Image: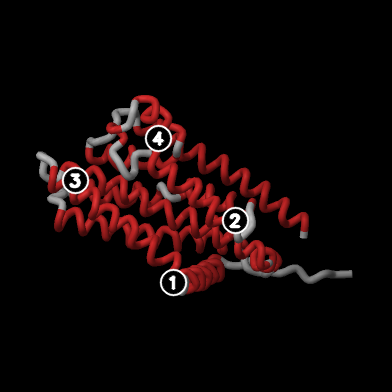
Amino acid sequence: MNTLQPSPLSLTQRWHILQLETQTELTKTLRTPGFVIPSLAFPVMFYVFFGLLFNAMGGQPGHAATYMMATYAVFGAIGPALFSFGADVATDKDKGILSLKRVSPMPISSYFAARIITAMLFALVIILSLFALGAAFGSVVMTRGQWVSTLITVLIGTLPFCAIGLFIGLSVSAKAAPAVVNLIYLPMAFLSGLWVPIQLFPSTLELAANIFPAYHLAQLALAIQGNDSGAPWYLHVGALAAYTLVFLGLSVKQFNAIDNRH
């Protein structure tokens, strides 16, 4: 007896599905002011209070504002990545939406890719907002290459946090996910030197910062300015790649376990 097999999707069809899925995720996210407003406002607000204020009080025009523009860009960019995957994937999992998408003709990769794109779009808005504030009010002066390199580095650097958030979203309930994400996100941001320059930390805390992926991403962004701690760039890239691969592997294992239970 012959069974009908669905024909493989063309690249055009896959691209169209990705566009629709991204539009859906973006629309759904924008209809959640409890996520949108803090994600966009907090990094900008903190940068105004700490980056621009410290810059005005310091003796080197633009130095504090330039340094903290990079660290707050990292802080702002990784938040949407963690929450979009951590909280939203957990909600979709508990409601059965994730299982429904798994058995639908749509490639499940489109679902995850759409979330990555949505997180990066939010990160883009945050980073450009900080750039505008730094240039207009913080005496931040960088070359065009430095501006572009910082933007690309931080955007690509959200990928490890998407992987971490995905593992959280697949591992905990929708009710617990926001609390778990915050328990990871906020202490990691502080201990990675995203709020306060890492050089102000005691030597033990400065050394401990190396275990956090946010520290390595911040150091890559700061290296573009020449304000990093001096470690080779490839060590930071290697650490971020390792975090991405480890949590992707854990997420695949968790995803398959969920699928087997259903």
Q: In the drawing, what numbered circle is on residue 191?
A: none
Label 3–label 2 contact, CB within 8 A: no
Type of amino acid at the residue the image marks with label 1: Leu
Q: Is residue 101 visible?
A: no
Instruction: Calculate the distance from the C-alpha at mark 1 to the C-alpha at mark 4.
Output: 33 Å
Instruction: Calculate the distance from the C-alpha at mark 1 to the C-alpha at mark 2.
Output: 22 Å
Residue marked by disc 3: 54
How crowded pointer 2 is (Cα within 10 Å; few <14, some 14-19, many 20+) is rated as some
What is the x, y in percent for residue 204?
Answer: 39, 25
Residue sitting at x 61%, y 65%: 92
What is the x, y in percent for residue 46?
Answer: 29, 53
Type of amino acid at the residue the image marks with label 2: Ala
Instruction: Calculate the distance from the C-alpha at mark 3 to the C-alpha at mark 2.
Output: 36 Å
Looking at the image, residue 144 sits to the left or right of residue 159; the answer is left
Q: Nearer the viewer, residue 214 or 113?
A: 214
What is the x, y in percent for residue 189?
Answer: 40, 44
Mark in front: 1 vs 2: 2
Residue marked by disc 2: 176
Mark in front: 3 vs 1: 3
Q: 17 above or below 143? A: below
